[in-house]
C-alpha cells in the first residue's frame, strides 16, 4: 500500500489558493518528497503531512519554483530534532546547482547526501530498512529547459506464498514472513531464497511524477499502466501549444493525449499557470483524450492498494 498526497498545483509562483507543485509518497511509515518549491512546508502542514520521516527528496530539475523551499525545510527538520540522514537526488548538475541552497541551509544536525542520479535507480530499503525490499525509484528523461527528469516509483509484489514448498525445505514458520517480504533466510540446511517458496510475481503498484515537460515518448513508456500519474498541464488553450513547447510545457490537450498513451489508471493534472483562474474549465480538453484525467488540487490524496489476487 502507498499513500500519495499532492501538496500543490501551481507553476512559477505560489498563489494564495494554490501552492507550488510538489507531492509526497508514503509507504511503510517512510516517505519521498517530489520537488520542494517555496512554501512546501506550509503546503505539507495544510495537507496534514509530516516530512520528518522523509528519506529522499527527488528533484525533477533546478528551477526556483521546484527547489527554493529546500533550505527552509532542512532547517526546520533540524530544529524539530531530526538526526537521521537525508538524501537529495536529481538530474545532472545536482552538486553545482544546489551548492548555494545548501550553504543557505547552514550547519545541520543530520547528514544530507547529495546523490547524483545513477542509471540503476534507487532501492529505498538501502536508505531506511523500514522501506519494503521491493520498493524502487527510477527516473526517466523529460523535455524541459536544461536537464530534467521525471520519476517512476514501483512497489513490487512477490508471488503467492506456497506453504508446502516451505515445509518441504524445512523452513521454520517464524521465517515465513521474511520470505514473503522478499528476503533470503538462513535455515539449518542452508539459505532459502524467496523464489523457492513463492509463485509467479504478481502485479505491484506504479506511481509517476513527471515534473515539468513538453510532450515526449518517455512519459508514456514510464507511466505504462501506472496506478497514478501526476502530470503537468501548464497551459490551458490549444492555441498556446507553440508557447508551451518553447518553454518545455504542455497544454491540457497535450497532457490528456500523453496520459491516454500511457494507459495510466488515475491521472492528476497539475502545474497550472497563474493565468489559469479555473483549471476545471479546461478539463474537457484533456478528457477528450483521457477520461481518467482530473484537475489536481492542493491536498488531494489517494491510497493505492495491491489488486486482489
Image: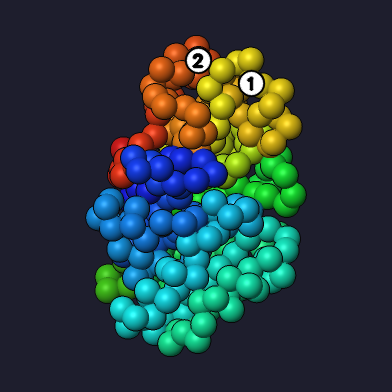
Q: How many other residues sit within 10 Å of disc 1, few (<14), some (14-19) or many (≥20)?
A: some
Q: Position of residue 218 (x, y in %)?
A: 68, 38
Quickly name the residue at label 1.
240
Image point (63%, 72%), residue name? 100
Query: Above or below — where is 294 with respect to 104?
Result: above
Which label is found at residue 149?
Answer: none
- The foreground one among 111 and 45 is 45
Please indicate whether residue 243 sits to the left or right of residue 86 in the image: right
- The relative height of residue 66 versus residue 301 in the rendered view (above or below) is below
Q: Which residue is mark 2?
A: 285
Q: Residue at x 46, y 18 (%)?
A: 282
Q: Position of residue 31 (x, y in %)?
A: 39, 62
| C-alpha distance separating marks 1 and 2 | 13 Å
Q: Nearer the viewer, mark 1 or mark 2?
A: 1
Q: Residues within 10 Å of mark 2 (few under 14, many from 20)?
A: many
Question: What residue sits 53% from the left and 60% below the top?
Answer: 68
- For the C terminus, which image quadrant? top left
Question: Could you say which is closer to the camera, residue 1 or residue 261?
Answer: 261
Q: How is the image coloured?
A: rainbow
Q: Please tell me which residue lies in front, 277 or 305.
A: 277
Amino acid at each position: 500500500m502507498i499513500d500519495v498526497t499532492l501538496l500543490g498545483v501551481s507553476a512559477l509562483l505560489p498563489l494564495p489558493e494554490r501552492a507550488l507543485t510538489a507531492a509526497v509518497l508514503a509507504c511503510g511509515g517512510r516517505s519521498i518528497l517530489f520537488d520542494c518549491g517555496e512554501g512546501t512546508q506550509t503546503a505539507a502542514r495544510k495537507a496534514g503531512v509530516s516530512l520528518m520521516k522523509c528519506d529522499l527528496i527527488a528533484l525533477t530539475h533546478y528551477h526556483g519554483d521546484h527547489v527554493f523551499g529546500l533550505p527552509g525545510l532542512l532547517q526546520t527538520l533540524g530544529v524539530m530534532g531530526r538526526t537521521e540522514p537525508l538524501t537529495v537526488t536529481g538530474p545532472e548538475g545536482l552538486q553545482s546547482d544546489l551548492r548555494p541552497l545548501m550553504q543557505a541551509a547552514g550547519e545541520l544536525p543530520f547528514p544530507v547526501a547529495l546523490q547524483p542520479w545513477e542509471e540503476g535507480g534507487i532501492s529505498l530499503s538501502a536508505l531506511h530498512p523500514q522501506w519494503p525490499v521491493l520498493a524502487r525509484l527510477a527516473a526517466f528523461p523529460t523535455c524541459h529547459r536544461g536537464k530534467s527528469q521525471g520519476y517512476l516509483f514501483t512497489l513490487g509484489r512477490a508471488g503467492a506464498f506456497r506453504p508446502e514448498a516451505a515445509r518441504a525445505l524445512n523452513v521454520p514458520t517464524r521465517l515465513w514472513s521474511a520470505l514473503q517480504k522478499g528476503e533470503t533466510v538462513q535455515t539449518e540446511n542452508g539459505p532459502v531464497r524467496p523464489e523457492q517458496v513463492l509463485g509467479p510475481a504478481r502485479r505491484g503498484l506504479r506511481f509517476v511524477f513527471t515534473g515539468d515537460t513538453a510532450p515526449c515518448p518517455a512519459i508514456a513508456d514510464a507511466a505504462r499502466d501506472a496506478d497514478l500519474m501526476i502530470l503537468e498541464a501548464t497551459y490551458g488553450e490549444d492555441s498556446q501549444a507553440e508557447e508551451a513547447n518553447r518553454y518545455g510545457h504542455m497544454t491540457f490537450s497535450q497532457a490528456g493525449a500523453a496520459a491516454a498513451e500511457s494507459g495510466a489508471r488515475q491521472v492528476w493534472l497539475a502545474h497550472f499557470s497563474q493565468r489559469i483562474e479555473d483549471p476545471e474549465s479546461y478539463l474537457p480538453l484533456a478528457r477528450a483524450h483521457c477520461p481518467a484525467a482530473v484537475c489536481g488540487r492542493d491536498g488531494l490524496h489517494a491510497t493505492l492498494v495491491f489488486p486482489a489476487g
